Amino acid sequence: MWRKWLAVLCIAAGILLIASPFLKEGLIGYLSGKLSSEQLTATQLKKNNQRDASFDYKSIQPPSFYEAVRAGTRVSSHAVIGRIKVKRLGIALPILKGTTSSNLLVGAATMRSDQKMGSGNYALAGHHMRRENLLFGPLMHVKIGDEVVITNLTSDYVYRVSNRKIVSENEGSVALQTNDKRITLVTCDKPTRTPNRLIVIGKLVRVEAHQ
């Protein structure tokens, strides 16, 4: 009898192992979409931006199924401080304060505590998943001239992509403050563990009242 149960457990474990990548990405898509659809106000975003946050660059690696499930219990709208859109690529994600596993699983995460939209280097990190339309995966198809828009629901900051490059994961200078007004988007160069990062840089071209 125990052999029969052992066989059933082995089969179930095998099915779960095969299905886990699809379940993981389905969960990530659901959590990101749920957070994106929440109706937050500019006042709430400003209050959220005043909260303390942690910044762990080691989190910028493809998450495991367990990490996705665990993050699902930790995701909070209190971390949301804005939104990012890259219309041509279909990117529309919440911006969350802090580079943490939970934040990276649902949107774009800020990489420094002193970041301010429209000022200096606004650096954002995001995951690159096997499903290319999730999170920052579409950035692999970014082109020079594409527009990136970030908003705090008071103003829209429009950047135009001026450069893209692959660098080592140890190239932390990409997130440092700069004198010029730019946005820097960071993601893995492939949807598996990798020592390289895709860096997309855009220059601020205009600021508009949010509509």
Image (tube, helix red, strand yellow):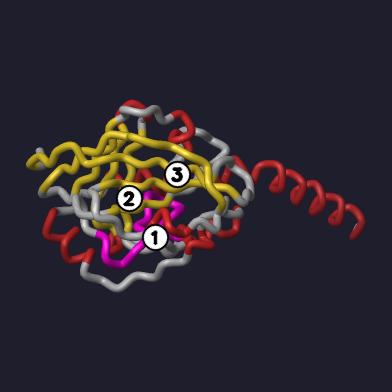
Residue 120 coordinates in the image, percent (x, y): 24, 55
Toward the bottom, the furthest residue is 52
> Do callouts 2 and 3 mark residues in contact (Cβ within 8 Å)?
no
List the residue tagged with mark 2. 35
Seen at 86% across and 51% down, the residue is 7
- Asked which quadrant contains residue 156, the reply is top left
**Amino acid, disc 1:** Val
Element type at mark 1: loop
- Asked which quadrant contains residue 179, the reply is bottom left
List the residue tagged with mark 1. 75
Is residue 148 covered in magenta?
no
Label 1 vs label 3, nearer the camera:
3
List the residue tagged with mark 3. 199
Instruction: Report the magenta residues as a range.
Output: 102-115
Distance from Cα at disc 2 to Cα at disc 3: 25 Å
Report the front residue among 48 and 170: 170
Distance from Cα at disc 1 to Cα at disc 2: 9 Å
Distance from Cα at disc 1 to Cα at disc 3: 26 Å
Seen at 41% across and 61% down, the residue is 99
Left/right placement of residue 5 relative to residue 198 reads: right
Residue 103 coordinates in the image, percent (x, y): 40, 58
